[in-house]
Image (cartoon, rainbow, N blue to C red):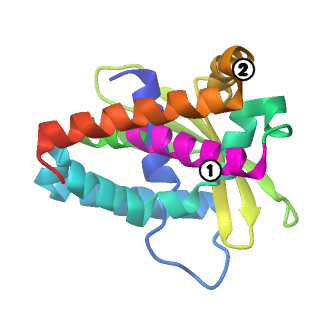
Amino acid sequence: MTALHKGILGAFMCCTLGVAHAEVIAPDVLIKNTVREVTAIIKQDKDIQAGNQKKILALVDAKVLPHFDFQRMTQLAVGRYWRTASPEQQQALVTEFRDLLVRTYTKVFTVYRDQTIEVKPLRMAPDDTEVTISTVISKPGTQPTSVDYEMMKSPDGWKVFDISVEGVSMVMSYRGTFASQIQQDGVDGLIRTLSDKNATATDGNVAKTGVQ
């Protein structure tokens, strides 16, 4: 499994929460709690381990998507071109980038077996609104992988807006590609490219799994 896959798997496990709470849970506590919850689900569900796309997507929808700030992630990836995009284009970019990230995330459920995740101690001030959660993902026989989660405090709790694997930002890694696409074909060109990729991937999953 690649370092990126390990990092994304960590993102799945470390940045999700199935039950809403009235009080804001500290980001490191949120991570520790949800590691146990999500790993238990994966270990017990043979269909997810076998790659059942319908079940995987249902789990993603329920446990993951509400706890990511996809608008900020998209804004960071698009960079300076975000300001010149129309509101309609911005919404389309968020939708397509979100789908791209979700497709990437769902792949790692079928490769999870015996990884362990260590959450490093967090020091934060009471008024901090952004923090970095550092973790180490380990698997017997492989080198540990460091994964950092950039999180921000929102009215709905802490949300992830970037993931770094061995110091490489996942969101920012898209910026160069997106900039080149926009320079060549404009914002609408980038939207079309992302939409085509997502549609192709969806068609492939339907053909492979029989999901309608």
In the image, residue 49 sits, relative to residue 170, either above or below, namely below
Q: Is residue 4 visible?
A: yes
Callout 1: few (<14), some (14-19), or many (20+) C-alpha neighbours within 10 Å? Answer: many
Compare residues 207 and 79 and report the one nearer the observer. Answer: 207
Q: Is residue 82 left or right of residue 37?
A: right
Cα gap from disc 1 to disc 2, whole angstroms: 18 Å
Q: Position of residue 203 (x, y in %)?
A: 26, 37
Callout 2: few (<14), some (14-19), or many (20+) C-alpha neighbours within 10 Å? Answer: some
Q: Is residue 127 magenta?
A: no
Of labels 1 and 2, the one closer to you: 2
Q: Quadrant of the N terminus?
A: top left
Compare residues 54 and 121 and report the one nearer the observer. Answer: 54
Q: Is residue 20 left or right of residue 201?
A: right
The residue pinned by badge 2 equals 179
Q: Position of residue 182 (x, y in %)?
A: 70, 22
The mark nearer the N terminus, 1 or 2, is 1
Label of residue 87 in the image = none
Q: Quadrant of residue 116?
A: top left
Q: Quadrant of residue 5?
A: top left
The residue pinned by badge 1 equals 70
Q: Residue at x 41, y 19 (%)?
A: 143
Q: Position of residue 92 (x, y in %)?
A: 61, 46
Query: As shown in the figure, which amino acid type bears the numbered disc 1?
Result: Phe
Give the structural element (helix, strand or loop) at label 1.
Answer: helix
Q: Which residues are magenta?
A: 86-104
Please, what is the dominant secondary structure of the magenta stretch? helix
In the image, residue 146 sits, relative to residue 90, either above or below, namely above
Question: Residues at badges 1 and 2 in contact (C-beta under 8 Å)?
Answer: no
